[in-house]
Amino acid sequence: MIINKMSNLIIKSIFLYLVFFTSVFANHNFDHWLKKFQTKAIDFGISKKVVYEIMSNAKFLPKVIEYDRYQPEFYEDTFTYIKKRSSTRKIREGVKLYNQEKVLIEKVEKEFQIEKELLLALMGIETNFGKYLGKMDIVSSLATLSYDKRRSAFFTEELLILLKLVDSNIINRNILYGSWAGAFGNFQFMPRTIRNYAIDYNKNKTIELKDTEDSFASAANYLKTIGWRKNQPCFFKIDLKENIPKKYLNSSARNIKNKRQVSFFKKYIKNFDKLKIQSKLNAAIIIPDKDIIPGAETLSPAYIVFENYEKILNWNRSLRFALAVCTLKESFKNEI
C-alpha cells in the first residue's frame, strides 16, 4: 500500500513538472491557435458575433491539462473508487433529493422507462446531486483541450458544437460553467450529448441542464436512446478460477471483447451457483485493476458484466465509473 502511494505521488509530481513547463510555451502559441479556430468556427456556420463574443475571453488553462493527465480513473483501485462514490452519506443525499422531487422523478421514470435509482446514481456521482456543477469556464476548458495535442480533434468538435448550441439559442451563454473537460449541468453532459439527447422538457424554449426538469428528462432520454434495458442486471462480482484463458479477461473500457452467454463462463467462476444469473444473457469478464494499479492481482477483483454495463460505458468510458454507478443504483433500491 505504501509503495502504491509513493508511486502515485511520483507520477503526479512528474505530471505537475511537465504541465508547468508545457504551459510556459503553450501560452505563447495559444493566441495564434485561437485566431485559426475562430476562422474555422465561422466557416462551420457559426455567426461571427457569437464566435468573437464567446471566444474573446477564452484562455489557456494549465490546470485543465493537469486534470486531463491525472484522472481518478487512472490511479484509484476499484475498491477505493467505488467506496468513495457509494457511501452512506451519498445514499442519504440521494434519498433526500428523491423525496423533494418525487413527482418529477417518477414521471420521468414512467415516461422513459429508466429506473429512478439509476438516474439518482448518475447525478450523485457526477455532481453530488447538483451541489458540485463545476466552476470552470467550459469555453476555456474546451479551447485548452482543443489546443492540446492529446485529443485535439475530439475537443475541437465539442467546442464547435457548443458554439453552435449558443448560436441557436438552445443553451444560455451566460451559464457556461462546468467541469474541466467541458461537461455541463446536473448530469455533466458534453456539448455533443446536449445536441444529440438533451430535451426542453418543461417547454420554455431553452434547455436548462442545471434545472431538475430538463436535466432528469434529458438523462433519461439519453439512456433510453442508447438502449438501457430496465430491470436487467449490470454486473456481478465474481471469484475466478485460475484456469480461465487470458483472452476472456478485459482490462480496457475501450473495447469489451470475447463476450459469451453466461452459461459459457460457468466453468471459470467459483461462486457461479450463488449468483442466480440468467444463463442466456450475453456477458463478459472484466478485471479493472490489472492495467492501472502497480502489482495488482490478475484475477481479483473481477466482475461479470452485461449489456447494461456497457451502456454506462457510453456515458463515461471508465470501468470503475460504470461499476460505481451500478453499485450506487442497487443501494438506492433498498432506500426508496
Image (cartoon, rainbow, N blue to C red):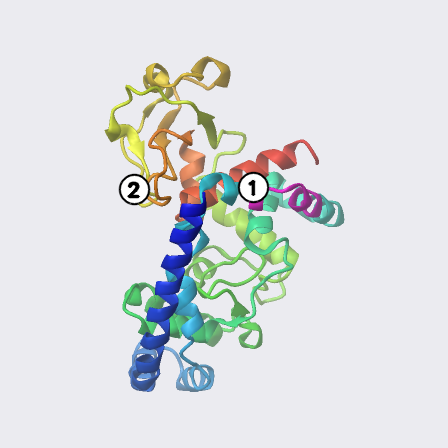
Q: Which residue is mark 2?
A: 255
Image position, residue 314 (x, y; %): 40, 47
Label 2 and label 1: CA atoms lie apart by: 25 Å
Residue name at image x 43 percent, y 24 percent? 238
Q: Nearer the viewer, mark 2 or mark 1?
A: 1
Q: Quadrant of the N terminus?
A: top left
Residue name at image x 59 percent, y 64 percent? 208
Residue closest to the eye, 150 or 4: 4
Image position, residue 158 (x, y; %): 38, 66
| Lateral position of residue 255 relative to residue 166, left or right | left
What's the residue type where badge 1 is placed? Lys
Q: Quadrant of the C terminus?
A: top right
Q: Judge whether residue 239 is colored magenta.
A: no
| Lateral position of residue 293 relative to residue 101, left or right | left
Q: In terms of image quadrants, where is residue 114?
A: top right
User: Which region shows up in magenta?
Assistant: 83-94
Inspect this view and state whether residue 161 appears: no
Q: Residues within 10 Å of mark 1 (few under 14, many from 20)?
A: few
Q: Secondary structure at mark 2?
A: loop
Marker count (numbered)? 2
Q: In terms of image quadrants, where is residue 65?
A: bottom left
N-terminal of the pair, mark 2 or mark 1, is 1
Q: Find residue 270 and name its label.
A: none
Q: Residues within 10 Å of mark 2 (few under 14, many from 20)?
A: few
Inspect this view and state whether residue 264 appears: yes
Residue closest to the eye, 167 or 231: 231
Image position, residue 219 (x, y; %): 54, 50
Q: Secondary structure at mark 1?
A: helix
What's the residue type where badge 2 is placed? Asn
